[in-house]
């Protein structure tokens, strides 16, 4: 029987004596469909108009079974996260993950994901400072993480979502990744950012810039909480380029592996880091795969993954349904903090810690 993970099923913050997580890496892949995450490349899309080299795409991503296809597309997610952590949102098995804001596009989704609840005041992607306290702001004010929270993204609305002016959280979403470079490496990364193309306009930069900027910040500043917002998957999907959508998803998977493997060999992070992966919204089905928003109900279906020392290795969770709004409290709970103490409207954490439950 499927159990909906609402307040009564939430997981309280871990007790200090049992908690091992001291750092959290939160990464979102904008608009990546649950269908590709759990089933790999779509046969119809692979041969559709949004593919320029079908033979090459088939070579890279087509395999006989859905299980093989999803691992070809997202090898880190399926060889590491699924083996050692937990995945939510396999709607084909009747245990979905859902957006609750009813709008199914970016700013409302990121607000829900980061603050823990939908807000009808956020009904566009306009650059308006978020009136809600995000988990990043909350943690930035807690003794565990004060001044050690940062966000890097591929969208220039990120600083408004995080509300940098009020929250004090460092957030970079466009242009050079280091507005005030202090090292030669940071200056070189800024030069690289200035030299790459801007196929989506100045508001959305390529993920490579975001990835390298975020990783350099992680390597040098050693934050307690790092949020990385990747965006190419959504941009290429809107352009109808299924080949480049898959390529961006595969590149994001490589980035996730790089983050995780660095954490596992670095003092202070090894055995003390949890990784949370999510998306801001889903996408349509069939010909609507390029779209999302309030006219595309299928876009309410998403997926979430959690990996870390406090998360039992249960793999795909087919025993319950969850919501996007549970991500924020989950990030806080992994660090032993209770987001709902300051934001009682926030959804409870995902049940990813404590004793192993049913698969």
Image (spheres, helix red, strand yellow):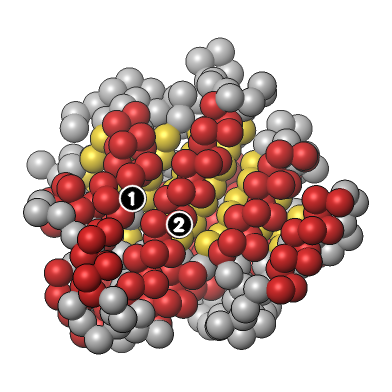
* Above or below: residue 16 compared with residue 108: above
* Mark earlier in primary sequence (1, 2): 1
Q: Which residue is mark 1?
A: 74
Which residue sits at x=63%, y=26%? 266
Which residue sits at x=71%, y=39%? 219
Q: Mark 1 falls on what kind of element?
A: loop
Mark yes or no: residue 159 visible.
Answer: no
Q: Quadrant of the N terminus?
A: top left
Q: CA distance from mark 1 to mark 2?
A: 9 Å
* Above or below: residue 147 compared with residue 313: below
Mark yes or no: residue 195 visible.
Answer: yes
Q: Which residue is mark 2?
A: 251
Residue 93 in the image, given as x and y percentages of width and height: 12, 51
Count residues near mark 2 (Cα–Cα under 10 Å), then give few for <14, some for 14-19, many for 20+. Answer: some
Which residue sits at x=55%, y=83%? 200
Q: Mark 2 falls on what kind of element?
A: helix
The answer to which of 2 and 35 lies nearer the viewer is 35
Q: How many marks?
A: 2
Asked whether the beta carbons under mark 1 and mark 2 sit within 8 Å of each other, the answer is: no
């Amino acid at each position: 029987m499927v159990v909906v993970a609402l307040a009564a099923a939430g997981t309280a913050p871990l007790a200090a004596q049992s908690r091992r997580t001291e750092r959290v890496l939160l990464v979102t892949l904008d608009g990546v469909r649950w269908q590709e995450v759990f089933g790999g490349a779509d046969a119809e899309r692979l041969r559709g108009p949004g593919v320029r080299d079908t033979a090459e795409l088939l070579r890279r991503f087509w395999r006989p079974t859905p299980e093989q296809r999803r691992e070809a597309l997202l090898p880190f997610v399926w060889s590491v996260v699924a083996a050692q952590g937990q995945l939510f949102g396999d709607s084909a098995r009747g245990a979905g993950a859902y957006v609750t804001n009813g709008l199914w596009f970016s700013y409302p989704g990121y607000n829900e994901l980061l603050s823990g609840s939908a807000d009808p005041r956020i009904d566009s992607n306009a650059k308006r400072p978020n009136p809600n306290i995000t988990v990043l702001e909350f943690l930035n004010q807690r003794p565990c993480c004060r001044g050690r929270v940062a966000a890097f993204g591929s969208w220039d609305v990120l600083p408004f979502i995080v509300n940098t002016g009020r929250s004090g959280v460092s957030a970079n979403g466009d242009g050079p990744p280091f507005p005030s470079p202090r090292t030669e490496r940071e200056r070189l990364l800024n030069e690289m950012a200035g030299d790459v193309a801007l196929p989506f306009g100045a508001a959305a930069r390529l993920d490579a810039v975001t990835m390298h900027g975020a990783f350099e910040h992680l390597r040098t500043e050693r934050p307690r909480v790092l949020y990385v917002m990747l965006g190419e998957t959504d941009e290429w999907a809107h352009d109808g380029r299924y080949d480049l959508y898959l390529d961006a998803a595969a590149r994001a998977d490589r980035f996730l592996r790089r983050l995780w493997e660095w954490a596992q060999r670095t003092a202070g992070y090894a055995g003390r880091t949890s990784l949370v992966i999510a998306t801001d919204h889903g996408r349509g089905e069939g010909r609507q795969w390029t779209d999302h928003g309030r006219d595309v109900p299928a876009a309410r279906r998403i997926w979430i993954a959690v990996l870390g020392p406090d998360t039992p290795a249960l793999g795909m969770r087919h025993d319950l349904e969850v919501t996007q709004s549970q991500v924020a409290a989950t990030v806080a709970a992994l660090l032993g903090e209770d987001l709902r103490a300051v934001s009682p409207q926030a959804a409870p954490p995902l049940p990813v810690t404590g004793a192993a439950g049913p698969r």
